[in-house]
Image (spheres, rainbow, N blue to C red):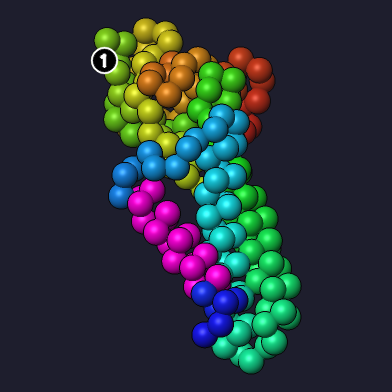
């Protein structure tokens, strides 16, 4: 194995070691700059791994040393773009009061006027379960449809979807 083989193998092993260390420490190994920094760092590690894989596979296939570099760079760049797309998409799904307002949910644990329950809703293919209280002095049974009208990750306030639809004259959109 020549110098390029060691570079490709080293980048692959270094990327795997960083991934395992980050996983074992619960995400505290790598620096986490603000505003998408976590996604960029993880995408760079993915690119490092696939740079090593692409170059090493090119060498094993018998490609000349200098021609394995464009293949390695291409596989690293494509993997970086794909990883960044998926990681940034997930990172932007922050459950803030602005993003929760108007979210339709289903009651998973009954809610009374004095006792909090839970609601579940789906966003971008992920189920979110949050504790909930009634905004009014009503109660909701399991599987009732509600709308989140206020709150954050820790606690949301809900109203009946049927009530809100009736208020705006959209009863035909109600489900049972």
Residue 26 coordinates in the image, percent (x, y): 34, 43
Task: Tell me residue 74's x, y (percent).
Answer: 71, 68
> Disc 1 marks which residue?
115
Nearer to the camera, 149 or 63: 63
Residue drawn at (39%, 14%), measured in percent from left and top? 134
Q: Nearer the viewer, residue 73 or 104?
A: 73
Q: Classify 89 as above or below 133.
A: below
For residue 9: magenta?
yes
Among all residues in the image, which is located at the extreme top? 137
Q: How many numbered marks does the figure carry?
A: 1
From the viewer's perspective, tell me whether residue 62 is left or right of residue 155.
right
| Residue occupying the point 66% across, 20% down | 169
Image point (50%, 15%), residue name: 150
Comparing 171 with 15, the one in front is 15
Decide if residue 13 is in sight here: yes
Residue 153 found in image quarter: top left
In the image, residue 28 lies in the stretch drawn in magenta: no
Asked which quadrant contains residue 59, the reply is bottom right
92 relative to 54, above or below: above
State which region is magenta. Answer: 7-23
* Residue 123 seen in the figure: no
- The image position of residue 14, as x and y in percent, is 45, 61
State the residue in front, 127 or 164.
Answer: 127
């Amino acid at each position: 194995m020549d110098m390029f083989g060691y570079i490709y193998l080293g980048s692959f092993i270094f990327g795997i070691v960083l991934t395992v260390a980050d996983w074992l420490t619960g995400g505290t190994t790598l620096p986490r700059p603000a505003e998408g920094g976590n996604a960029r760092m993880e995408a760079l590690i993915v690119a490092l791994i696939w740079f090593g894989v692409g170059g090493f596979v090119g060498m094993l296939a018998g490609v000349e040393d200098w021609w394995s570099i464009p293949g390695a760079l291409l596989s690293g760049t494509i993997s970086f773009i794909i990883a960044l797309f998926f990681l940034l998409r997930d990172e932007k799904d922050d459950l803030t009061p602005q993003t929760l307002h108007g979210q339709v949910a289903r009651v998973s644990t009954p809610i009374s006027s004095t006792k909090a329950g839970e609601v579940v809703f789906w966003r971008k293919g992920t189920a979110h379960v949050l504790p909930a209280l009634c905004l009014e002095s009503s109660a909701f049974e399991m599987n009732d449809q509600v709308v989140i009208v206020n709150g954050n990750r820790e606690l949301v306030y809900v109203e009946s979807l049927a009530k809100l639809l009736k208020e705006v004259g959209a009863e035909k959109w109600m489900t049972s």
